């Protein structure tokens, strides 16, 4: 299926021309086997939350492989680089795993609770993302100049766009195990499910501005946003209505599970073909399936089967994705000077998150009651993950891309490990 022109910017790869192409079955076999091994080691000996534990082990293994290579003890590093180089992380996540993970996450979000928090979620997913993009991009431009790491302003804005949205995969994996209040869970989950779609649109506009500045006008940006965001919502409603008609007309849990799988895979692919946002469409379809279809079109056996199926898919893909993020360090470009910039930008990103979240919530709080400590929890709970890395990998080849990719990776690792592990204690202390 050909990819739409407006989304080709998110399908660029930097490795396919110089690395061997592996059979997809071979790659899947290696990733699943490695992920299962890491998950077993974590569960048996470490006891961290599964996704975070798997990522930590993957990082440690990557560092061990690098040390062995530096000591001349085997050629594991080159073998690992060749294998990972054959995986298009951008394509694997954005056009593969993402649709399943978003649908599984949206499936258990209560629509009435989401409606109660709609103004907070909408403001964070739009104004919050755009504000953070500008703040992070501008601060990164001046900071990197001071550190003699030259990066054009447009690349700094691209960095701001890809690092500003919270990652729904990382957020949902963390929130589900915390046992927070329903109101807080809905706000965190709702923001993460929708702001990545807006963040991708902002990223696409900036990347088009970099590659084809003559094509970018106000009307072009407005049309692109309408096609992606509004079109994604409308197409998601169509998918939900189709799912309702099909599932309501039969009573066979095996076929009904298969229909939900078709809605996700076929719907996501068709959304991309129609130039609409696949992520937003799948989230809307998941919300309808988890609320309307669950109440009015499914038997008890079907509900249980669909819940079990998508929970298993969610867990498996999350483990594989976090293992892949940890192993990606083997092929991330590295420069000692970039490390300093990366750690400083962690603080910058958190500060920008505080401002971009705090302003709209304070304004909404003038007219409605806001949960105590909501801003603090949203700032520290705004985890970044694989989507940010995938978008960084889609940038044009060159030194600028390498710097953005490294900075992104540093922030993602800090976010998942440090923020992910300390979010629970923070919430318990504040609430």
Image (tube, rainbow, N blue to C red):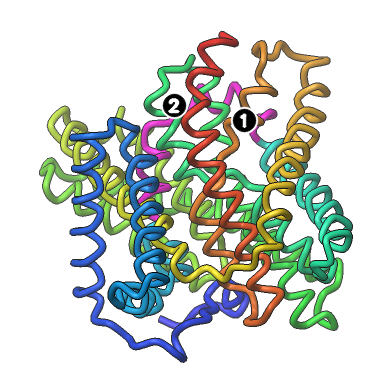
* Residue 47 coordinates in the image, percent (x, y): 28, 30
List x then y, in percent, for residue 364.
Answer: 78, 22
Q: Residue at x 47, y 46 (%)?
A: 283
Q: Main secondary structure of the magenta part?
A: helix
- Whether residue 268 is in magenta: the answer is no
Q: Which residues are magenta?
A: 98-121
Q: Residue furthest bottom?
A: 17
116 part of magenta stretch: yes
Q: Is residue 379 above or below residue 256?
A: above
Left or right of 63 in this view: 201:
right
Q: Residue furthest front?
A: 71
Taking the image as drawn, is residue 23 in sight? Answer: yes
Left-right relation of 121 to 356: left
- Upstream in the sequence, badge 2 or badge 1? 2
Q: Secondary structure at mark 2?
A: loop
- Residue holding disc 1: 380
Residue depicted at 68% across the width and 28% down the height: 120
- Label 2 with label 1: CB-CB less than 8 Å: no
Classify 312 as above or below 236. Answer: above
Distance of mark 2 from mark 1, alpha carbons?
A: 23 Å
Quadrant (top left/top right/bottom left/bottom right) for the N terminus: bottom left
Q: Residue 110 — which label? A: 2
Instruction: Kindly identify which numbered label has been placed on residue 129.
Output: none
Secondary-structure class at tag 1: helix
Q: Quadrant of the C terminus?
A: top right
């Amino acid at each position: 299926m050909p990819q739409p022109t407006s989304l080709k910017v998110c399908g660029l790869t930097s490795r396919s021309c110089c690395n061997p192409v592996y059979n997809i079955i071979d790659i899947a076999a290696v990733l699943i086997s490695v992920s299962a091994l890491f998950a077993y080691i974590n569960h048996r000996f470490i006891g961290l939350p599964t996704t975070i534990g798997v990522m930590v082990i993957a990082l440690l293994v990557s560092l061990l492989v690098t040390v062995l290579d530096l000591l001349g003890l085997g050629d594991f590093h080159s073998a690992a680089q060749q294998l990972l180089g054959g995986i298009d992380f951008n394509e694997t996540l954005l056009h593969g795993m993402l649709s399943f993970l978003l649908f599984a996450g949206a499936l258990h979000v209560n629509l009435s609770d989401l409606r109660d928090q709609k103004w907070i979620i909408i403001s964070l997913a739009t104004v919050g993302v755009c504000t953070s993009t500008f703040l992070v991009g501008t601060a990164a431009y001046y900071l990197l100049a001071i550190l003699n790491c030259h990066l054009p302003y447009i690349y700094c804005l691209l960095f701001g766009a890809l690092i500003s949205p919270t990652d729904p995969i990382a957020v949902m994996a963390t929130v589900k195990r915390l046992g927070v209040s329903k109101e807080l869970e809905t706000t965190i989950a709702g923001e993460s499910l929708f702001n990545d779609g807006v963040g991708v649109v902002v990223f696409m506009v900036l990347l088009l501005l970099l590659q084809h500045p003559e094509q970018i006008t106000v009307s072009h940006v407005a049309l692109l946003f309408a096609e992606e965001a509004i079109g994604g919502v409308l197409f998601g409603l169509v998918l939900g209505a189709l799912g309702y008609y099909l599932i309501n007309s039969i009573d066979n849990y095996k076929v009904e599970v298969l229909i939900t799988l078709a809605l996700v895979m076929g719907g996501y692919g068709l959304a991309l073909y129609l130039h609409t946002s696949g992520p937003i469409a799948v989230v809307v379809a998941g919300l309808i399936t988890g609320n309307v279809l669950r109440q009015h079109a499914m038997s008890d056996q079907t509900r249980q089967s669909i819940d079990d199926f998508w929970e298993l898919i969610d867990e498996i893909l999350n483990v594989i994705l976090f293992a892949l993020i940890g192993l990606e360090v083997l092929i991330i470009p590295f420069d000692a000077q970039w490390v300093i910039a990366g750690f400083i930008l962690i603080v910058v990103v958190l500060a920008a998150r505080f401002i971009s979240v705090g302003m709209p919530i304070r304004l909404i709080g003038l007219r409605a009651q806001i949960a105590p400590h909501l801003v603090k929890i949203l700032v520290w709970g705004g985890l970044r993950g694989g989507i940010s890395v995938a978008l960084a990998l889609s940038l044009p080849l060159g030194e600028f891309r390498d710097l953005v990719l490294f900075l992104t990776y540093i922030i993602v690792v800090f976010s998942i490990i440090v923020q992910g592990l300390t979010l629970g204690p923070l919430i318990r202390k504040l609430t």
